[in-house]
Image (cartoon, coloured by chain):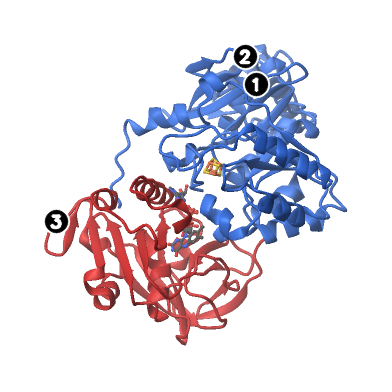
Chain colours: A blue, B red
Amino acid sequence: MNPKTVLFGKTLEELKKLAEELGQKSFVGTQIAKGLYQRRVSSFSEMTDLSLPLRQRLEAEYELGLTLPNKVDASIDGTKKYLFPAAGKFIEAAYIPDTDRKTLCLSSQVGCKMGCLFCMTAKQGFQANLSVNEILNQVRSLPEGNELTNVVYMGMGEPLDNLENTLKSLEILTADWGMGFGVQRVTVSSIGLMPALETFFSRTRVRFALSLHNPFEDERAQLLPVQNVHGLAQIIGFLKSIQDTDARRLSIEYIAFAGVNDTPRHVKELVRLLHGLKIRVNLIRFHPIPGTPLIGSDESTLVRMRDALSERGIPTTIRRSRGQDIYAACGLLSTKALLQNSNQQDF
Amino acid sequence: MAFFLRPVDVIRLENSGPDSWTVYWKRNFDFLPGQVVALSIFPSGVQRLYSLATGNHAEEVGILFNLAPGGALTPLLQAVRPGHRIYVSDPFGSFVGFKGPAFWIANGTGVAPFLSMLDSGLIEDKVMIHGARTREYFLGQETFSSLLRESYVRCASADQGKGLFQGRLTTYLSSRDWIKTVPYYLCGSASMIVEARDILISRGVPFKNILSEVYF
Ligand SMILES: Cc1cc2nc3c(=O)[nH]c(=O)nc-3n(C[C@H](O)[C@H](O)[C@H](O)COP(=O)(O)OP(=O)(O)OC[C@H]3O[C@@H](n4cnc5c(N)ncnc54)[C@H](O)[C@@H]3O)c2cc1C
Ligand code: SF4
């Protein structure tokens, strides 16, 4: 028997096409989209604006494709880390409640190919790209899904390495016919893959955060191998080139490592590099991962960096650590689950 | 949106190992050994990155590629013949080789930048540690063994015999002490690079001496 086609994760255009294939008018596609993404139905029978025969046909030949998480770790501060089954493996999604906002940090790939030195997900290697369904299922099937105000693509994987699915998921997440998140409530974080970054800017309006971590190109390459092919000068040059015509908010993610990227020399170079760019910096505390040679900067260094950058006109904040008692690092939970059965033989 | 590519004519396509080929064209740029190009079969088709696998003074330039079944580009690239036109960017990237001692560590087609470095005359004081499943998968092994001789180590995870270290590349790395003051160049799959880098670091090599090129 053929597996049923999954509908959750299809764009409006795809749903309209499907409606036509089913002998319906294309507006039926819009009705299905609203049922899937706005009314959050959990079965086709709840789509009562569709005719009964159509609902019965959808029930027989299609499925919604919603998958509940199968594990959760809860922190005393309210942060919850969910493990979702996806692509035959596991991915993590973190729910981070705050007084004024409730944020979901979601994954875009199972594992990652980018090999960043400080990252637990990197240790899984690359397992699979998440489908649009698997990306958005993290929003939809999160027990707190109804309360979410913000979504950030900062979990496992590099979103721009799964470009088409990331773009489609953003379309559904932010469309009026879709999940209706305002573009200023969605942020995609990336280490900066070119030319995918250009495509991302031309096809979306959501916020962008660049994982920078070191303003010196040779030093950044020691932390992020991708720097060897997609250099900072090119990425920052591109961001500068579009800022007159593109008003979205840009930010820099900067994990501070003691003695590695947190000195006055680094601050000075960061100021030089970002000169002329309207951008803010988020300084992030490092949560050590097993076997890492890196140590997080201490509190006073973080404060010194924040003040030095702010004084030079770059609005800078130190990101509050959340869920530290369960946190360890993004990718830790799923990496543990995965490494138990890894046996790579090609090297 | 994409890299700017120029047309070049294929001179030949050579079989370089099981499922691996090298495609050559007349050199149309200067480059540093270790750099990459973006390549496409069509003027505005799918682009992928490849390390240049030939010397930077050679008349012909080539890339070594592995066929990814179902892939968007390599099945088409494998079908090109002499005279066919392909499209290539200017070279770029900072994973480049220098004179002086260095350890090179690679799996799969990750040997390509090191073949380029050797062919560009960077031979002295280099040690190459090569990981593959069985002996036929050590791409470029004739070149490495003839130029590096005993400084070329083949680690076979599923093979044994004369001249092979029997075990994974990572087992080899774990079983030895490593000089801490020279650069280590790692190239190939993300999983190999992450595992090898972790081992070197655990054996005292500073991460600042490890340069990686991930074939993502
Ligand atoms: C800096 C750099 C240098 C590179 N140099 C070389 C080189 O010298 N020689 C070479 O052969 N390749 C090299 N690559 C890889 C190359 O760019 C292509 O990704 C590769 O040739 C596959 O292209 P494709 O279009 O045929 O397959 P694709 O369409 O990209 O993918 C084919 C299939 O493989 C899967 N897949 C793709 N990548 C991975 C992965 N990493 N792990 C697991 N599954 C994967 C996909 O999901 C798909 O099913 C390099 C990559 C980078 C980033
Ligand atoms: S930091 Fe992001 S891009 Fe880098 S390895 Fe981890 S998940 Fe991938």
For label 3, the residue is B160
Question: How far apart are the alpha carbons under marks 2 and 1?
Answer: 7 Å
* Residue A8 in view: no
* Residue B25 in view: yes
Name the quadrant of the N terminus of chain A. Answer: top left
Circles 3 and 2, Cβ within 8 Å, touching? The answer is no
Chain letter of mark 3 equals B
For label 2, the residue is A78
- Amino acid on which the number 3 mark rests in the picture: Gln
Circles 2 and 1, Cβ within 8 Å, touching? The answer is yes
Graded by Cα atoms within 10 Å as few (under 14), some (14 to 19) or many (20 or more), the crowding at tag 3 reads some
Residue A16 vs B44, above or below: the answer is: above
Horizontal and vertical percent position of residue A52: 66, 14
Tag in front: 3 or 2? 2
Graded by Cα atoms within 10 Å as few (under 14), some (14 to 19) or many (20 or more), the crowding at tag 1 reads many
Question: How far apart are the alpha carbons under marks 3 and 2?
Answer: 54 Å
For label 1, the residue is A96
In the image, B102 versus A131, the foreground residue is B102
Q: Which mark is residue A49?
A: none
- Disc 3 is placed on an element classified as loop
Tag in front: 1 or 3? 1
Horizontal placement of A173 versus A337: left or right? right
